[in-house]
């Protein structure tokens, strides 16, 4: 995947979201983080009070945890804003 910290990545993502979905709509976020309860909690807190359905699954060796979040978002800008919020969590990989 392209570098999610670059503006070009977000411009392309916004165009894709606008072209492929009617908004508001449910959106699936997927993140991989080192298996650290604090980091997982940081991500969960970003989506707190939004009615998000959050599932986590540890890797086979337990070193990483995948965090999947399904949440109703109002538009592509809102989706991107959440990616940017999550990007400050150290070690997170956005899928």
Image: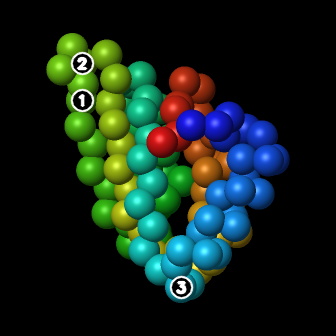
Q: Could you tell me if the residues under marks 3 and 1 are in contact, i.e. CB atoms within 8 Å?
A: no
Q: Is residue 47 left or right of residue 67?
A: right
The correct choice, above or below, for 12 with respect to 56 in the image is: below
Residue at image position (37%, 64%) is 70
Image spot of residue 79 (x, y percent) = 60, 64
Residue at image position (49%, 59%) is 47
Mark closer to the observer (3, 1): 3
Image spot of residue 25 (x, y percent) = 47, 80
Image spot of residue 87 (x, y percent) = 63, 39
- Which residue matches tag 2? 62
Mark closer to the observer (3, 2): 3
Mark 3 vs 2, N-terminal side: 3
Instruction: Assign the N terminus to one quadrant of the image.
Output: top right
The correct choice, above or below, for 18 with respect to 61 in the image is: below
- Which residue matches tag 1? 58
Residue at image position (31%, 63%) is 53
Instruction: Decide which of 11, 70 is in the foreground and name it.
Output: 11
Q: Secondary structure at mark 2?
A: loop
Instruction: Decide which of 15, 50 is in the foreground and name it.
Output: 15
Q: Secondary structure at mark 1?
A: strand
* Circle 3 residues within 10 Å: few <14, some 14–19, many ≥20: few
- Which residue matches tag 3? 22
Q: Could you tell me if the residues under marks 2 and 1 are in contact, i.e. CB atoms within 8 Å?
A: yes
- Disc 2 and disc 1: Cα gap in Å? 5 Å
């Amino acid at each position: 995947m392209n570098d999610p910290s670059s503006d070009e990545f977000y411009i392309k993502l916004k165009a894709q979201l606008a072209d492929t979905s009617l908004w508001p709509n449910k959106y699936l976020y997927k993140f991989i983080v080192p298996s650290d309860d604090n980091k997982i909690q940081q991500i969960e807190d970003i989506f707190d009070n939004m009615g998000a359905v959050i599932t986590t699954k540890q890797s086979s060796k337990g070193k990483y945890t995948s965090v999947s979040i399904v949440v109703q978002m109002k538009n592509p800008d809102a989706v991107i804003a959440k990616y940017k919020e999550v990007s400050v969590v150290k070690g997170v990989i956005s899928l």
